[in-house]
Structure formats: C-alpha cells, structure tokens
Image (tube, helix red, strand yellow):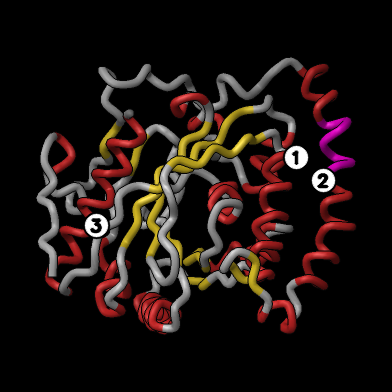
Amino acid sequence: MPALPVPSGPSARDPCRDRAALRYDSNMTAPPPPIGAGARSAWPVRALRYGYRIPLLLAHLLVGLPLVLLLTLRPARRLRVHGERFDYRVIRAWQGGLMRIFGFRVRQTGTPLPGAALFVANHVSWIDISTLHSQRMMGFVAKREIAHWPLVGWLAIRGESIFHARGSSESMGGVLHEMLARLRGGHSVGVFPEGRTRDGREVGPFHARIFLAAVEAGVPVQPVALRYGTRGAAQADVAFGPDENFMQNFLRLLGDPPRVAEVHFLEAIPPATESARRRIAELARQRIVDAMAG
C-alpha cells in the first residue's frame, strides 16, 4: 500500500485539531472584500437581471424538472452515454443549466476520478452542490434540514443525498454505514468535511471521522477546491451573509452579476489503513487550501 505524503508548510500543523481555521495566505492572494461587497450592485441593474433570470428559472423548473423526472425513471438507468449512466448525465445537464441561470460560468480543472471515490470539498454555500453536480455525479452527505428547502431539497433527494442530523452520533453512524454501502457498491459520495458553510474567506478544520467510510471501502479520496469569482474574489459574496437565510441568499445570488465558478479536481489520495484517516483528512485539506491560494 503506497505511503501517504507527509503534509508540509504552514498548513501541516495538525489542522484537524486546530480550532482556528486557516485563512488564505495574504502574500498569495489579495485580501477578500467585505462580505457581499461586490454583490450588491445598483438596484436598476439587479432588477434587469431579475427580469430575465426569473422567467428562465421558472421555465427551468416548470419544463425542465418534469423532463428530468421522465428521463431519470428506472429504465433510463440502464442506458449509458460515454460510459456514464444516462440519468446521471440528465441531472448534470440540469444542474449546469441552473448554474448558468444564476450567472455562473463553470470552469473545471483536473479530472474527477471514475468509479467509486470519496470527493471532499470546501463548503461556501448551497450552490456548491449544484456546482459539483454539474461536473460529476455523486451522492452528497447533507444536513437533514436541506431536504425541506425549496428546490434544493428536491435536488438533493434526486441526487441521492445522504441526510445527517447534525450533532447526533447515532445519525452519523447511520451515515457512515450508508456511505460504506454505496462506495462498496461502486458509487461515489461527496462530503464537506468542515461540517458547515463558512464566510468564504477560510477553510475550516476537516473532521477525520467522515473519511472512515473511504478507508473501510478501500477507495481513493479526491479533494476538490471550489472558488467563485476570478481567483476566488467572490467567495465572500457567494457565502451566506450574517443572519442571511437560505431564501435570502438564493434571491441575492439570482440578482448578482455574472461570475466564474472554478472546480479544481486535485490529486487523489490512494486508499490507506484506518490509522491513517487523520493524515488523509490533513492532506486533503492542505491540497484544497493550496489550490485556493494559487
């Protein structure tokens, strides 16, 4: 079994145990603007964007969703398009369309692993799931409340999400069991090891326990860095603002200016023993932090 690389540099100081989240190196990127500073453009411009994006969103929901339901019925799951399940391709296309309606131009760097793998990413906002789904189909581990959110809840259920009651050890045990079953069955799972969204300026500590399913299933872990705006300049704009709920963030992003969404599929970490899961978490986090600062 190949040895895991030993993290080096400033992010090697056991970030999983360090409660202080590592902020991006100011020597490598410009300091991020205050939260929402670049997003709240003049109302007439926002009104114009709402004027054409809302009809597009309604069409995407009222016409696109029934088509997705029809094209993802059980018979379609046996079809393959370039080696990918047809229903997965349909869901990815729909998510890509949703991103475009919100003004995001998705750019992918690197190649997602085929087959069973655990994808781990930094967590900025609810849009992260659509961003990732537009590039690679995977079942996400998500907090249980998301199942009841408008639109996003339906997408999460349709996207084979695994729901977790935060703060419940019993729930986490069930989540790990389901993750293990899916990974052993050849499916991919996506997680946000920080456990919650951040303000867009930092990558918090990774919870090592969530990596146990990948270790026991013997599958690789692929870190994924999500950046919004050129070199991450819009991270704070996309993130939830202070006291901002889902619907407020949803509506604000719908009226925001166009921006790029970067999805960096980074070097994968090979399967390892259970004793190495903390090192896997550290290494995955370090690679994401390095990509965010690059």
Residue at 31% in and 79% down: 217
As displayed, is residue 291 above or below residue 192? above
**Dot 2: element:** helix
Q: Which quadrant holds residue 69? A: bottom right
Residue at 27% in and 41% down: 21
123 drawn magenta: no
As displayed, is residue 93 above or below residue 158? above
Q: Which residue is mark 2?
A: 57
Q: Are marks 2 and 1 in contact (CB under 8 Å)?
A: yes
**Dot 3: element:** helix
Q: Which residue is mark 1?
A: 101
In the image, 111 versus 135, the foreground residue is 111
Whether residue 122 can be seen here: no
Q: Earlier in the sequence, mark 3 or mark 1?
A: 1
Numbered range of the magenta stretch: 50-57
51 drawn magenta: yes
**Residue 149, percent across and down?**
67, 60
Specify whether 213 is left or right of 199: left
Q: Which residue is mark 3?
A: 281
**Residue 46, percent across and down?**
77, 24
**Where residue 213 is drawn, which disc sits there?**
none
Amino acid type, label 1: Ile
